[in-house]
Image (spheres, grey):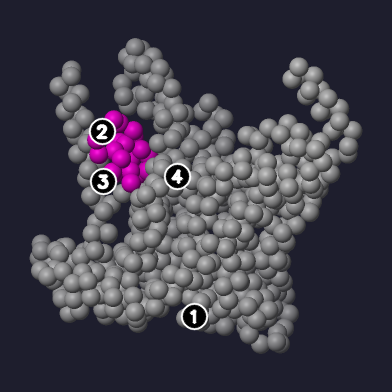
Amino acid sequence: MRAARTKSMRIITLLAAIVACAHFIPFYILLTTSLKAKGDYSSKWIFPADISFHNFSEAWERASLGNSFINTMIITGFSALLLIIFGSLAAYPLARRETKLNKAVFALLISIMIIPPLTSMVPLYRMVVDAGMVNTHAIAIFINTAAYMPLTVFLYSGFIRSTIPKELEEAARIDGAGMLKIFFTIVFPLLKPITATICIISCVFIWNDYQFAIFFLQDQKVQTLTVAMAGFFGENANNLHLVAAAALMAMLPMVVLFLALQKYFIAGLSSGAVKG
Amino acid sequence: MSEIARDVHVKQVKPKKQSSLWWMYIPALLSVLVFMIYPFVKGTLITFTNWNGFSQVYQWVGFAQYERLFSDPDTWHILKNTLLYGLGSTFFQNVVGLLYALLLNQSIKTKAVTRTIVYLPVMISPLIMGYIWYFFFSYDGGALNDLLGVFGISPINALASPSLNPWIIVMINTYQYVGIAMVVYLAGLQSIPKDYYEAAQMDGAKQGQQFFTITLPLLMPSITINMVINIIGGLKLFDVIIALTAGGPGNASQSMSTFMYDLYFKRQDAGYAATQGIFMAFVILIISFCALAYFKRKETEMS
C-alpha cells in the first residue's frame, strides 16, 4: 500500500515537472534567441556557442526603451495613485450610506464594468483629438484611471462593508473631526490589504496596456513599452534576435516584481480577476 | 460599561439624517462619466451616421450602418472568430486549469515551482506574449520549424494558415491565462473539507466517483467565476492577435476588436467601426449574462 502510494507520488511529481518544463519553453526560446548574433540561423533550441549581450545594448538604444520605461512608469504610477485616492474616497459613502442616490450611483458604476472600454474607442479618440490631448501622459493617466475605477470602487466598498467597524468612525465624528480627515486618518490606514491588492492589479494591467496606448500614445516621446515594442517589431521583423532582446528587457520589471512578491501578486490578481 | 458607551453613541448619531456624502465620489464618477459613459452614448449616435472619423461633415444615414453590419459576410466570420477566442479559450483554460489544480493540490516537491512558472505569463503584456510565440511559430527560423526539421518534416507556415492561426491564438491565450483559472480552482479545492472524502472512502467510493460526487459539485462557484472572467477576457482579445497575425491573412484571424481598429484607422470608416463596437458590447453583454445565469442555476441545482 505504502509502496504504491510513493510510486503514484513519483508519477505526480514527474507530471508536475513536465508541466513546468512545457510552460517554460517560450521563455527558453526567447532567451536563446536574444543571445544570438544577427545572421546566426542555428536552431532556436540550442544556446549560441559564444553568448553575446550585444543585442541588449543595441535594442535598448534603437527601441528607445529607456524613454519608454520612464513613460510607462509615470503613467502606471499616477494612474494607480489616482485610482487609490479617488477610488477609496468614492467607495466609502457607497458602502456606508445606503441612500437612494448612492445605490443608484453604485449600480451605475458596476454596470459599466461589463462594457469593454474598447467598444467606445471611436468617439473617445475623437474627443481626445478635439481636446488636443493626444500624445500626452495626462490622457493616458485619465483613461486608465477611468477604465479601472469601477473595479477599484467595487473592491474597496466590499472591503469596507465586510471589515471596517462602524463604531470607529462614529467615535471620531463625536470629536467633531471633518469627514475628509476622519477618512484619511482613521479609515484609509485600515484599508491597507485591499489597497495593496488594487495597487498590484492596476499596476499589472496598466503597465501592460496596449489597447489604449496604441490609440493615444503614438508619438515616440510619450510612447509606452508596448507601443515601443510594436514599432520595434515592425522595423526589425528580419532580425528577431534584436526583438527578442527588447522583449526580454520590456517584460523583466514585472517578472522580477512577481518573483519577489509572488504571494501578494497571485492573491491580488486572482481576487481582481474574480471580482472583475 | 462598554455597552452603555455604545448606547450613548447610537443615541447621539441616529437622530441626524443620513447624508449621502455625495461629494466624496464626485471625482470617481466624473472620470467614468467623461471617459466611459459619454463616449459610449456618443458612439451610439455615430452609428447612425456615415462619418469617416476625421472630417467635420457627415450625414445621418439612419439604420444603414446596421443593415450593412448584418449583411456584411465579414461580420459573421469575425463573430465566429470572436466566439472561438472567447469560448474556445474558456474551455481549454478551465479544463487544463482544473487538471493543473488537481495535480498541484497534492503534496509534492515540484508544486511551488510549477505554480510559479504556470502563473508567470499572467504578468506579461499580451502583446509581448504574442511576439514571444511568434519566435516559436514563425516560418523563417521559428522554433517549431527547427524542431520539425530534426525529424525531416518540411517547415510549415502556421501563422499564414487561415484555418490554423485562430487556433494558435486560442492556444496562446490559454497558455497565458491558465494560471488564473488554476489558482481559482486551487483555492476552491482547498476549501473542500477533508472529512467529505474520508466519509466517501468509508462508503467505498472510488476516486473517480469522489471527483464527480464531491469535488465537482463543490467547485461550482469556482467554475462560474472562471467561466465568466475567461469568456469576457477572450471575447475582448486584441493584443495577441495584433502581435501574431494583425488579423490576417485577409480577415482570417480578425476579432471584433481588431476589426474595429482596422475600420477606424486603416479604412477611415468610423461610423461603421462604431457600429461594430456597439455590436461587440451587445454580444459580450448577452453572452456573459447568459453564462452567468446558466452557471448560477447549475450552482443551486448541484448544491
Element carrying mark 1: loop
Q: Kindly tell me whether residue B221 is visible in this rendering.
A: yes
Q: CA distance from mark 1 to mark 2?
A: 50 Å
**Which residue corresponds to mark 4?**
A264
Q: CA distance from mark 4 to mark 2?
A: 22 Å
Q: CA distance from mark 1 to mark 4?
A: 33 Å
Q: Are marks 4 and 2 on the same chain?
A: no
Q: Chain of mark 4?
A: A
Q: CA distance from mark 3 to mark 1?
A: 42 Å
Viewer-side label of 4, 3 = 4
* Whether residue A223 is situated above or below residue B256 in the rendered picture: below
Q: Could you tell me if the residues under marks 1 and 2 are in contact, i.e. CB atoms within 8 Å?
A: no
Viewer-side label of 4, 2 = 4
* Whether residue B72 is situated above or below residue B110 in the rendered picture: below
Q: Amino acid at mark 3?
A: Val
**Which residue corresponds to mark 3?**
A19
Q: CA distance from mark 3 to mark 2?
A: 14 Å
Q: Is residue B95 magenta?
A: yes
Q: Chain of mark 2?
A: B
Image location of residue B285, percent across then percent down: 60, 54
Which labelled disc corresponds to residue A221? 1
Viewer-side label of 3, 1 = 1
**Which residue corresponds to mark 2?**
B108
